[in-house]
Amino acid sequence: MTFTVAALYRFAPFDDPAALRQPLLDLCAAEGVKGTLLLAPEGVNGTIAGSEAGIAAAIAHIRALPGCAELDVKYSTAAGMPFQRLKVRLKKEIVTLKVPGLDAARDAAPYVDPADWNAVVDDPDTVLIDTRNGFEVGYGSFAGAIDPATKSFGDFPEWWRANADRFAGKRVAMFCTGGIRCEKSTAFLRHEGVEDVVHLKGGILAYLEQVPAEESRWHGSCFVFDERVSVGHGLVEVGEKD
């Protein structure tokens, strides 16, 4: 059996995330869906896997949550179930940056579609920043991208503040695995006074899905947070690094 994998997120205001947890947990359990979903006052994030019908039911349920009609979802497949169990957790943030007052739903920078991203990578006047941690970057990245070499996303603000002067007056383009960290990190940069900042719509996964390998500016594979370990163009399972 081939399993459908859905990586999803949406920044949306949830007044009472705890009230959303049990119905979502029950629905996923009934449909045989496994993986991890995070609920927080700022929205929902996670990766789940199951049958095509089971994932469709789970996604329909999440889209019906407040502000989630335009839920961002990346679909791929796995030869085996990539998760051992189902978890629906309540968190303070759906992606942890630890910067008070950020509103990614309101303040995230403009998107660049995957089809237009090569022009961004090739632009010598644009600073390309990989917002993922150093371990993930070790699997692959875009040509010429700056690796902040952080251990976690929560380290990014400190790195930026220590290096911001290097990028003064430059256009900044940011990317991450599925788009969620860029929504928040570009909101952070705008909070820090950076006016010209953009990010890759749908993240690396959307780029690898949509851009032909022969036109790619991507080198290596993309680490994913399940038992497939990493994927390449077409979101084909790659596994561990050599």
Image: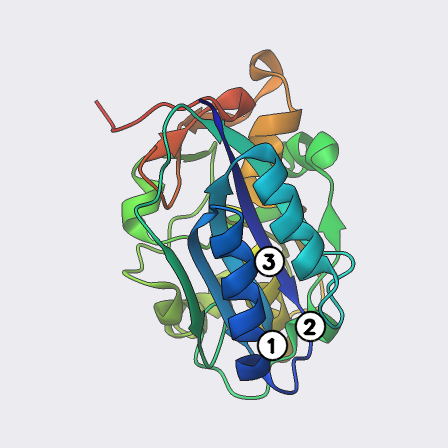
Q: Secondary structure at mark 3?
A: strand
Q: Residue furthest top?
A: 214
Disc 1 and disc 2 in contact, CB within 8 angstroms:
yes
Residue 81 horizontal/vertical position (percent):
37, 35
What is the distance, in whole Å, between disc 3 and disc 2 at their CAs? 9 Å
Above/below status of 126 relative to 187: above
| Amino acid type of the residue that numbered disc 2 sits on in the rendered structure | Ala
| Amino acid type of the residue that numbered disc 3 sits on in the rendered structure | Tyr
Q: Which residue is mark 3?
A: 9
In primary-sequence order, the first of circles 1 and 2 is 2
In primary-sequence order, the first of circles 3 and 1 is 3
Residue 145 horizontal/vertical position (percent):
47, 42
Corner quadrant of residue 15:
bottom right
Q: Secondary structure at mark 2?
A: loop
Q: Which residue is mark 1?
A: 42
Give the class, few, some or many, for how many residues have Cα within 10 Å of label 3's Cα (few <14, many ≥20): many
Which quarter of the rendered picture does the N terminus lie within? Answer: top left
Q: Which residue is mark 2?
A: 12
What is the distance, in whole Å, between disc 3 and disc 1 at their CAs? 10 Å
Query: 104 or 155: which is nearer to us?
Result: 104
| Amino acid type of the residue that numbered disc 1 sits on in the rendered structure | Glu
